[in-house]
Amino acid sequence: MTSLNRETFEILDLNDSLAFMRSEFSLQDGLIYLDGNSLGVLPKATASHVSEVIQQQWGVDLIRSWNCHQWMQKPTELGDKIGRLVGAEMGQVLVCDTTSVNIFKLAAAAVKMRPGRSKLITETGNFATDLYLLQGLAKLLGDQVQVVALPRDQVLNAIDDDTALVLLTHVHFKTGAMWNMASVTELAQKSGALMMWDLSHSVGAMPICLDHVSADLAVGCTYKYLNGGPGSPAFVYVAKRHLAEFQQPLTGWIGHAKPFDFEDDYEGAAGIQQAMCGTPAVLANAALEVSLDLMLEVDMQAVRSKSMHMGKLFIELIQQRCPWFIIGSPTNDEHRGSQVSLTHLQGYAIIQALIARNIVGDFRAPDNLRFGFTPLYLRYVDLWDTVDALVDIMSNESWNQPQFLQQQAVT
Ligand SMILES: *Cc1c(COP(=O)(O)O)cnc(C)c1O
């Protein structure tokens, strides 16, 4: 392994085909932001567009905007834009609600589509909301279904002809470990189960081909790599071949075939529109639209290449200069999403010490330090400078101070 130095990273920045994107984002001088996998950075164009929607569409045009500014069409319009990022043809993706709510809707629909099958399979250590929503659904349905949560290496063997649904997160939120979407989907379907992918940590970070791998269902977040803003609405994907029998249980009026007929009885809209529950979040959709348009300007394969390269270099730097840490992510670039986790028992305080230097990563209990790589606005030198700061913090034990050890509510 050749020894790396800061100049190596400066040269990589000069040759970076995505470097031009950084100026599209509102980043404070001196900030190194390695948390775009948790909350993406504000695009510069967002504020003026949202302000225009507020002042003109809401402020002046008021209720007429539902028609003249197509507020009601935004969930499917934005859904189709996300479709281009996840390899889904038109009419299968919709923007609505939160990832949590959407998991419930799709899991309940899956149980209906696989009558007589009782297992909902997922992995232990999955993002908590995925587990909790399956547990909530099982509780609601009584004895009809049960959640089978198993360690990662046992999940695939457990899929059998009593399995209704397999729900997995494509890229693990703590370790960044990535499932092979095509082979896992094929395996689940061989047993007759439906496959739902949670794409929260992959959409916007790499090319995804939902149609190509024949996925059944998917959900994902838009405030992470898609930069939609805090609490921005999530998305659902239902494969076209399932739309005719798809029935989700949150039968709100906006998912009705004719919401403005105000009939007493529910009749679901045809197509993906039925995944809607209530009124769309117009202002949040306006912010998301700007981010999606920006994301659609870049080649996802280039994003993935830069992200893999950044992860690889970061791991090399840690191995060369930081003996204090254990690498908690796959070292094979093909098996890792767009983040690298390090493990250390004092992880929380170390991250706080980094944040005090304007280098923002995050911590996931009990011992994970997470560093997310967002190729649109991160520079290669940022990796060098982060590891340089880590070396200093660790060799001087400067993390060991009361202000860094005191844990706050949101980590
Ligand atoms: C971030 C994330 C979520 C977020 O769910 P919300 O309903 O938006 O809070 C869900 N699942 C996974 C895997 C995530 O990483």
Image: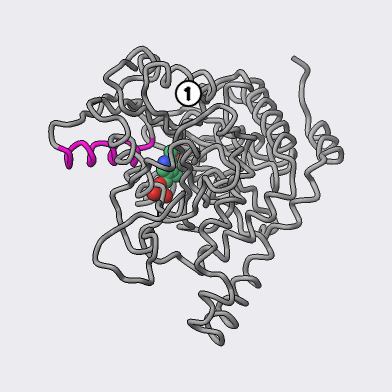
Residue placed furthest toward the bottom: 60
Name the residue: 35% across, 52% down.
409
User: Which color mode does the image show?
Assistant: one colour
Q: Is mark 1 within 8 Å of ligand 1?
A: no
Quadrant of the drawing holding the N terminus: top right
Q: Is residue 129 magenta?
A: yes
Task: Say if residue 363 shows up in the picture.
Answer: no
Which of the 4 image quarters holds residue 259?
bottom left
Classified by dominant secondary structure, the portion drawn in magenta counts as helix
Residue 38 horizontal/vertical position (percent): 50, 46
Q: Amino acid at mark 1?
A: Thr
State the residue at coordinates (33%, 35%).
110
> Is 208 located above or below residue 379 in the figure?
above
Q: Which residues are magenta?
A: 127-141
Task: Say if the magenta span includes residue 250.
Answer: no
218 to the left or right of 110: right
